[in-house]
Image (cartoon, rainbow, N blue to C red):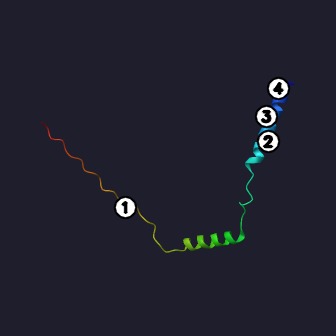
Amino acid sequence: MKHLLILGLALAALGGAVTFAHARPPTVTNSPGYEARLKESRSALGNSPSAPATAPVAAPKRSKKKHPN
């Protein structure tokens, strides 16, 4: 009986933790105006004719040769 009570409490705690994981503050909501502006800016970026930037190739560093004594 004691083990079933502990198991039940553990499952209830786990279920409560799962419900809190999906909670969001009221400020995190989708705004239709924001979504429209975001979509417009993304489409403008996708249509830009700029070429992808390439990283400059680094020249290998030269090391000094050690002279025999």
Q: Is residue 63 left or right of residue 48?
A: left
Res 3 label = 4
Q: In this figure, which residue is indicated by the disc labeled 2?
A: 15
Mark 2, other Cα within 10 Å: few <14 / some 14–19 / many ≥20:
few
26 versus 38 height, above or below: above
Count neighbours of disc 3 (C-alpha within 10 A) and say few if under 14, some if 14 to 19, many if 20 or more.
Answer: few
Label 4 to label 1: alpha-carbon separation: 65 Å
Q: Earlier in the sequence, mark 2 or mark 4?
A: 4
- Where residue 53 sits, quadrant-wise, is bottom left
Q: Secondary structure at mark 1?
A: loop
Residue type indicated by callout 2: Gly
Q: Are marks 2 and 1 in contact (CB under 8 Å)?
A: no
Classify the position of the N terminus by image quarter: top right
Local secondary structure at mark 3 = helix
* Mark sitting earlier along the chain (3/1): 3
Amino acid type of the residue that numbered disc 4 sits on in the rendered structure = His
- Tell me the residue at 40%/61% (across/down): 55
Q: Earlier in the sequence, mark 4 or mark 1?
A: 4
Residue 31 placement (x, y as % from top left): 71, 67
In the drawing, what numbered circle is on residue 10? Answer: 3
Measured along the vertical axis of the image, is residue 19 above or below residue 38? Answer: above
Asked whether 15 or 44 is in front, the reply is 15
**How far is the residue under mark 2 from the one under mark 4?**
18 Å
